[in-house]
Image: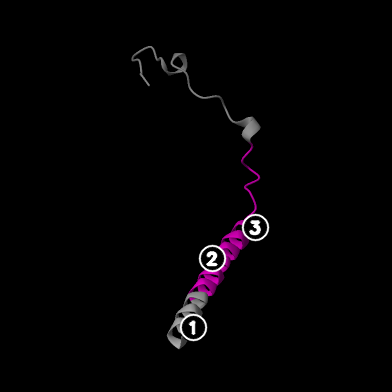
């Protein structure tokens, strides 16, 4: 009976350690993300449209995508 209790305590200890580890990693990731603000110079609205085939045609040569 005592051997069974020891296994149960060991399993509970391992699960608690895993929970603490996952919580720690999640907290560190979240804090790292919160501390770095987004780059204000990046404005999605001001991005130029993607290049088309017509915009890649030069008089000397033609580039294919």
Q: Residue at x 46, y 88 (%)?
A: 2
Report the span colored magenta.
14-43
In the rendered image, which quarter is residue 61 located in? top left
Q: Residues within 10 Å of mark 2 (few under 14, many from 20)?
A: few
Q: Which label belongs to residue 34?
A: 3
Left or right? Give the position of 4 relative to 62. right
Q: Nearer the viewer, mark 3 or mark 2?
A: 2
Nearer to the camera, 27 or 53: 27
Q: Is residue 20 above or below residue 42?
A: below
Q: Is residue 13 above or below residue 64?
A: below
Q: Main secondary structure of the magenta part?
A: helix
Does the stretch in magenta take in 18? yes
Q: Earlier in the sequence, mark 1 or mark 3?
A: 1
Q: Residues within 10 Å of mark 1 (few under 14, many from 20)?
A: few
CA gap between label 1 and label 3 equals: 43 Å
Q: Quick one: quadrant of the C terminus?
A: top left
Q: Which residue is mark 2?
A: 22
CA gap between label 2 and label 1 equals: 26 Å
């Amino acid at each position: 009976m005592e051997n069974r209790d020891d296994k149960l305590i060991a399993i509970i200890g391992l699960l608690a350690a895993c929970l603490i580890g996952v919580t720690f990693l999640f907290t560190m990731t979240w804090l790292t993300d919160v501390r770095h603000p987004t780059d204000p110079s990046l404005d999605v609205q001001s991005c130029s449209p993607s290049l088309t085939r017509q915009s890649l045609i030069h008089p000397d040569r033609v580039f294919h995508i």
